[in-house]
């Protein structure tokens, strides 16, 4: 079988490698308009935090390694046309020459782009986004030179950038249109703790503010205009408004209202020989009545695996997502899964919740670490539908436990009695999750 994949980022790579592992005789052609493969877009944060010594190292593997695994790699190849009737892809190489390649099955893994609407932007020398390796190199150089920087968007990218920049002696502004940072993943309790850490670090936090424009005032500086004020900057990073890149297929594949490609549980599009994965599709969310555009890498690689398996004729369905995330910011690990209280209300689910700060260790140990934990339950069934964690201790694996509990519809009482390990030198007889559930149960049943 001959399979062509358009897009060599997380989804395209996972699909290509899975196809070759399942059947080494499968002809796999991976096409990308960029000059490199597998760069991790958050690599700029890793480099700024000195977790890697070279930005170029933040990759899964090289194109040479892919070729060594039997994948045909076409880089600097911009696909201009897809002819689904004849099963032909037309692309242009770096020299401007036009080529055609045929396929039996096609996987669309073109990902997402970030953009700003209704704004007249200064040149990309002053306002930019970063996603691939060349743009990340440019942004890193400009961040080092800039003295006053605004970051637009208080999601993971924006907050992680603030953390990486906070000790470099620059004036940093974080602009978020919502009333809290990381609002898509966290409730007010944990987000307010993070906001205090952001402000304490010297970053100037602008909540409930939207960028409405830019204007030049000097050769080097310019003004970032928000709904509340004007900020003098010499560099701005836009970290909002990711959207699916479906321009190649919008004329012949069914799209959803949010611009994503409509797929079934096997990642198959309205054309049975074309599959779509990653940020170009919407995902079914546990305890939600709709599919949502959720540009998270863990969703991307799972959808790519499902697509590759089905391309080769093995039935496999995509499971629900809990949009499980984790990061380390301002010396704290932060993790989230499932619905927040606000999301649950939007879904028409009545909920009750508990927020606690609990010690990890027993009191006789010199080392004492705390965990902030939020748990959201469906009222009536007492089924867990959301969880959030924050601690200086690495508690990120516990969010996977909460994700599994949500996926399996685990109840409050089941969480209290769930079997977790105990070691007197490490933790307490009841795990953090069980203890939080236990305290909520006591609160509910106390006479």
Image (spheres, rainbow, N blue to C red):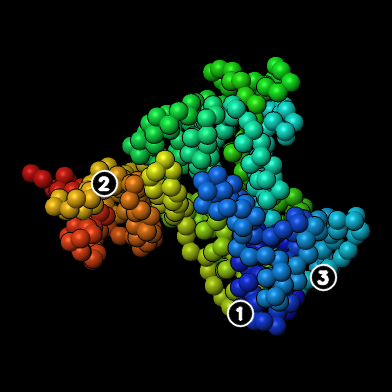
* Residue at disc 3, secondary structure: strand
Which residue is located at x 59 percent, y 46 percent?
44
Residue 375 can be seen in this image: yes
The residue beneath circle 3 is: 102
Q: Residue furthest left?
A: 447
The residue beneath circle 1 is: 22
Q: Residue 268, percent across and down? A: 64, 65
Dot 2 and dot 1 residues touching (CB under 8 Å) = no
The residue beneath circle 2 is: 370
Q: Residue 200, percent across and down? A: 40, 29
Viewer-nearest of discs 2 and 1? 2
Which residue is located at x 34 percent, y 57 percent?
398
Q: Quadrant of the N terminus?
A: bottom right
Q: Is residue 362 left or right of residue 4?
A: left
Q: Quadrant of the C terminus?
A: top left
Viewer-nearest of discs 3 and 1? 1
Are there few (<14), some (14-19), or many (20+) residues within 10 Å of tag 2? some
* Residue at disc 2, secondary structure: strand
Query: Of marks 3 and 1, which one's residue comes earlier in the chain?
Result: 1
């Amino acid at each position: 079988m001959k399979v062509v994949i358009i897009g060599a980022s997380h989804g395209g790579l996972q699909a290509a490698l899975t196809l070759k592992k399942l059947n080494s005789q499968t002809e796999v052609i991976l096409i990308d308009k960029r000059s490199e493969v597998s760069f991790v877009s958050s690599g700029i944060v890793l480099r700024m935090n000195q977790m890697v010594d070279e930005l170029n190292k933040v990759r899964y593997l090289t194109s040479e390694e892919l070729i060594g695994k039997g994948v045909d790699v076409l880089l600097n190849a911009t696909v201009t046309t897809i002819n689904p009737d004849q099963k032909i892809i037309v692309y242009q190489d770096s020299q401007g020459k036009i080529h055609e390649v045929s396929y039996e099955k096609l996987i669309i893994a073109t990902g997402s782009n970030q953009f700003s609407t209704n704004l007249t932007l200064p040149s990309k020398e002053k306002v930019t986004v970063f996603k691939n390796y060349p743009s990340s190199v440019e942004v890193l150089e400009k961040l080092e030179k800039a003295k006053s920087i605004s970051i637009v968007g208080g999601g993971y990218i924006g907050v992680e950038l603030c953390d990486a920049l906070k000790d470099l002696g620059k004036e940093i502004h974080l602009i978020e249109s919502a009333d809290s940072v990381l609002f898509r993943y966290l409730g007010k309790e944990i987000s307010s703790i993070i906001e205090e850490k952001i402000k304490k670090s010297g970053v100037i936090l602008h909540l409930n503010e939207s960028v409405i424009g830019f204007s030049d005032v000097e050769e080097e500086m310019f003004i970032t205009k928000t709904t509340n004020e004007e900020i003098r900057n010499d560099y701005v990073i836009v970290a909002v408004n990711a959207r699916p890149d479906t321009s190649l297929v919008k004329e012949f594949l069914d799209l959803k209202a949010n611009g994503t490609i409509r797929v079934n549980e096997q990642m198959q599009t309205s054309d049975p020989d074309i599959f779509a994965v990653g940020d170009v599709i919407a995902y079914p969310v546990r305890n939600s009545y709709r599919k949502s555009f959720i540009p998270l890498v863990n969703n991307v690689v799972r959808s790519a695996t499902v697509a590759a398996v089905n391309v080769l004729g093995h039935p496999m369905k995509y499971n629900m997502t809990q949009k499980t995330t984790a990061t380390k910011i301002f010396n704290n690990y932060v993790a989230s899964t499932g619905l927040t209280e606000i999301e649950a209300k939007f879904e028409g689910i009545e909920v009750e919740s508990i927020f606690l700060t609990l010690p990890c260790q027993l009191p006789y140990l010199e080392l004492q670490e705390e965990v902030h934990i939020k748990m959201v339950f469906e009222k009536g069934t007492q089924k867990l539908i959301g969880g959030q964690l924050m601690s200086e201790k690495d508690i990120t694996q516990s969010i996977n436990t909460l994700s599994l509990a949500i996926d399996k519809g685990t109840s409050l009482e089941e969480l209290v009695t769930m079997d977790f390990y105990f070691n007197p030198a490490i933790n307490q007889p009841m795990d953090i999750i069980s203890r939080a559930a236990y305290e909520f149960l006591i609160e509910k049943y106390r006479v």
